[in-house]
Image (spheres, rainbow, N blue to C red):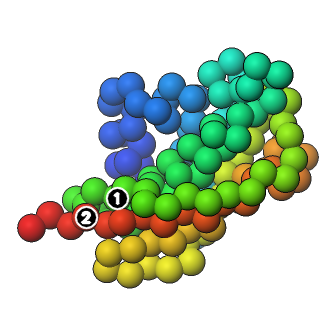
Amino acid sequence: MNIDRINQIIKAKPNLSTALGMEFFSTPEDDTCMARMRVDERNRQPFGFLSGGASLALAENVAGVASSSLCPGCACVGIEVSGSHVKAVAEGDIVTAYAKLLHSGKTLHVWQVDIKDTANELISSVRVTNYIIRKK
């Protein structure tokens, strides 16, 4: 999936993705997208671990980037995010989110997003549903 066009939009002005330190990457597969985020003062809990909310934000954002890449000219907005956090990640580590398209309809996309640490261990498993708003 080529996300170069979406990356230009993201980097054009401040937003949640840039505030939390997310970076998005193209993948060779048409139905996947990838993002990385270093665990630091922007996205950690006071205890020094990655915030669960930041993990969910990473998952929703990578799924949104992916839907936007598949639907040029559309607004793709998250309407449901549900996740389970299974392992803590300490400040200084980097997490990688892998989004895989499960369903692609005219108005809905469903993504499975697995977030892993640098040891490739599962941190969070998140399901994201995006609503696709087509211009009339």
Comparing 33 with 40, the one in front is 40
Which residue is at 83% across, 22% downward? Answer: 47
Q: Residue furthest left?
A: 136
Q: Which residue is more in the foreground, 1 or 43?
A: 43
Q: CA distance from mark 1 to mark 2?
A: 6 Å
**Mark 1 residue element:** strand
Position in image of residue 12 (x %, y %): 33, 30
Q: Does residue 75 appear in the picture of this structure?
A: yes
Q: Residue at x 66, y 43 (%)?
A: 55
Q: Measuring from the top left, give residue 96's x and y in whole percent.
A: 71, 47
The residue beneath circle 1 is 76
Amino acid bearing label 2: Ile
Q: Write the residue at 59% across / 51% down.
A: 59
Give the camera-side residue of 90 and 45. 45
Please tell me which of labels 1 and 2 falls first in the chain: 1
Graded by Cα atoms within 10 Å as few (under 14), some (14 to 19) or many (20 or more), the crowding at tag 2 reads: some
| Residue 27 drawn at (x, y percent) | 58, 60
Instruction: Give, as a three-letter code, the residue at label 1.
Output: Cys
Query: Which SS class for mark 2?
Result: strand
Q: Are marks 1 and 2 in contact (CB under 8 Å)?
A: yes
Q: Residue at x 56, y 77 (%)?
A: 102
| 52 with respect to 74 (left or right) | right
Quick check: 95 above or below 90?
Answer: below
Judging by the rendered image, the residue that carries numbered circle 2 is 133
